[in-house]
Amino acid sequence: MAWRRDRYWDPFDIMREIQEEIDAVFRDFMRGPRWRQGEIGAEWREPFVDIFDKGDEFVITAEMPGVRKEDIKVRVTEDTVYIEAKVKREHELEREGAVRIERYYSGYRRVVKLPEEVVPEKAKASYKNGVLEIRVPKKHPKKTGEGFEVKIE
């Protein structure tokens, strides 16, 4: 056995270190994407987003369960949609004469880059059953239709 400082080298030490690193990576992965703010206990997550091209407009849907409509902010520029929603939960529990108050702050943040320019002033948003839907008309919608027939020579 090889000597390592005050004890013998153990090949299982390396295996334990590797296992600890794998555990740490797995823990971070399971927590999901999030942003840390300066607030203690605040965790920001990215909502799942779908973008649909409807020809003359983009329809963006974002899953944000547990959010009140009043706590959602949507901002639209010529090519980007910014979504932010804060979730604040307070729970009081009285037991054995003591009152315990638990506070939980979190929320969703997402920046969605659009493939074409849009008209921000005409954007509309609705929220129902935990799903935010944003409709943004395109600035220069492409004409999709019959096209025109080309003669074959």
Image: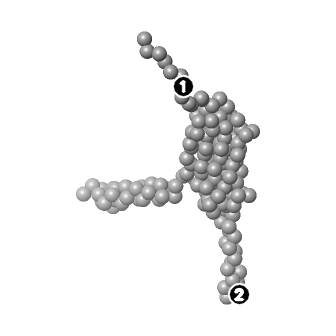
Question: For the N terminus, which image quadrant?
Answer: bottom left
Question: For this rendering, which residue is in front, 104 or 48?
Answer: 48
Q: Position of residue 90 (x, y in %)?
A: 69, 70
Q: In the rendered structure, find residue 47 and report the number of the disc placed on it.
A: none
What is the secondary structure assignment of the residue under circle 1? loop
Please tell me which residue lies in front, 110 or 76.
76
Asked which quadrant contains residue 142, the reply is: top right
Which circle, 1 or 2, is nearer the viewer? 1
From the top left corner, tell me how far across and down residue 77 is, in percent.
70, 37
User: Considering depth in this image, is 18 or 137 the residue closer to the camera?
Assistant: 137
Residue occupied by mark 2: 97
Residue type, numbered disc 1: Gly
CA gap between label 1 and label 2 equals: 77 Å
Q: Quadrant of residue 8?
A: bottom left
Disc 1 to disc 2: CB gap under 8 Å: no
Q: Amino acid at mark 2?
A: Gly
Residue positioned 60% across, 51% down in the render: 62
Residue 5 visible in the current orientation? no
Q: Position of residue 48 (x, y in %)?
A: 55, 51
Residue found at x 40% / y 56%: 22
How would you rate the neighbour count of disc 1 (Cα within 10 Å): few for under 14, some for 14-19, many for 20 or more?
A: few
- For residue 26, say whether it is visible: yes
Q: Is 91 placed left or right of 2 in the picture?
A: right
- The residue that mark 1 highlights is 147
Q: Residue 5: image x %, image y %?
A: 36, 56
The quadrant in which the C terminus is found is top left
Name the residue at 49% across, 18% down: 150
Q: Is residue 61 above or below residue 10?
A: above
